[in-house]
């Protein structure tokens, strides 16, 4: 269950003032939305992927959790993906930043991972809203890890539109990003969802 906190806020107001209380907020349709706490399983999946990426040679300099990203749509929104892999340009753009927010004028991350949480609202947000926002933001790959449906959907940007590949069970994850990083030890969906 998500809770609307404050309506009618712009990106500038969102960045200047955070609502009272603990938790992670996203800006969506001019509202601060309090995101429900992640389940233990979802956190384990995100951490498992971070460690897997580290085995591929991606250093902590490029890996981010709980980093905000501004995305465009009908209104500017702010998302907080479960995991991101930044490009060198994005790392440099954030170097002197006082807040871990990738603004619209900054380079996009190379890869964004969202782990689906239960509930129609969360499922719709990850599969529909974020898909169009991340595509418009020109994020090269968007991974939707869905432990509820035992599948991983990898969306790869191709001429400004996402190509979709769905993996399940013993399928090894494959994508242009993994190929660029020479992933020899390919991870299967079963390994990701069972070991996490």
Image (cartoon, grey):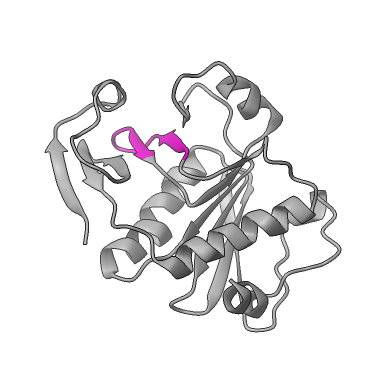
Vertical position of residue 117 compared to residue 72: above or below: below
- Residue 83 spot, x, y in % from top left: 54, 50
Tell me where residue 11 sits by quadrant: top left
Tell me where residue 110 sits by quadrant: top right
Vertical position of residue 48 compared to residue 196: above or below: above
Query: In the image, is 18 to the left or to the right of 8?
Result: right
Q: How many dots with numbers?
A: 0
- Residue 44 spot, x, y in % from top left: 53, 65
Q: Nearer the viewer, residue 182 or 51?
A: 51
Residue 21 counted in the magenta span: no
Query: In the image, is 107 to the left or to the right of 26?
Result: right
The residue under the point 13% across, 36% down is: 7
Whether residue 168 can be seen here = yes
- Which quarter shows the N terminus? bottom left
Query: In the image, is 187 to the left or to the right of 29?
Result: right
Whether residue 176 can be seen here = no
The residue under the point 40% across, 58% down is: 126
Tell me where residue 78 sits by quadrant: top left
- Which quarter shows the C terminus? bottom right
Query: In the image, is 41 to the left or to the right of 95?
Result: left
The residue under the point 43% across, 49% down is: 132
Toward the top, the furthest residue is: 96
- Residue 50 spot, x, y in % from top left: 64, 54
Toward the bottom, the furthest residue is: 169
Vertical position of residue 45 compared to residue 71: above or below: below
**Start-end of magenta stretch:** 67-78
Residue 71 counted in the magenta span: yes
- Residue 146 spot, x, y in % from top left: 48, 70
The residue under the point 86% across, 63% down is: 184
């Amino acid at each position: 269950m998500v809770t609307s906190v404050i309506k009618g806020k712009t990106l500038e107001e969102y960045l200047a003032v955070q609502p009272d209380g603990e938790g992670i907020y996203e800006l969506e349709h001019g509202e601060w939305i309090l995101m429900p706490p992640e389940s233990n399983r979802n956190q384990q999946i995100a951490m498992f992927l971070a460690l897997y990426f580290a085995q591929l040679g991606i250093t902590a300099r490029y890996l981010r959790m709980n980093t905000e990203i501004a995305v465009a749509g009908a209104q500017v929104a702010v998302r907080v993906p479960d995991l991101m892999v930044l490009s060198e340009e994005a790392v440099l753009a954030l170097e002197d930043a006082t807040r871990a927010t990738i603004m619209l004028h900054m380079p996009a991350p190379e890869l964004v991972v969202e782990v689906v949480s239960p509930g129609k609202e969360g499922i719709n947000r990850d599969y529909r809203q974020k898909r169009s926002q991340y595509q418009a933001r020109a994020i090269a790959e968007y991974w939707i890890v869905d432990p509820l449906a035992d599948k991983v959907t990898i969306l790869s940007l191709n001429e400004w539109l996402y190509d979709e590949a769905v993996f399940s069970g013993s399928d090894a994850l494959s994508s242009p990003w993994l190929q660029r990083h020479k992933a020899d030890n390919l991870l299967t969906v079963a390994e990701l969802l069972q070991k996490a």
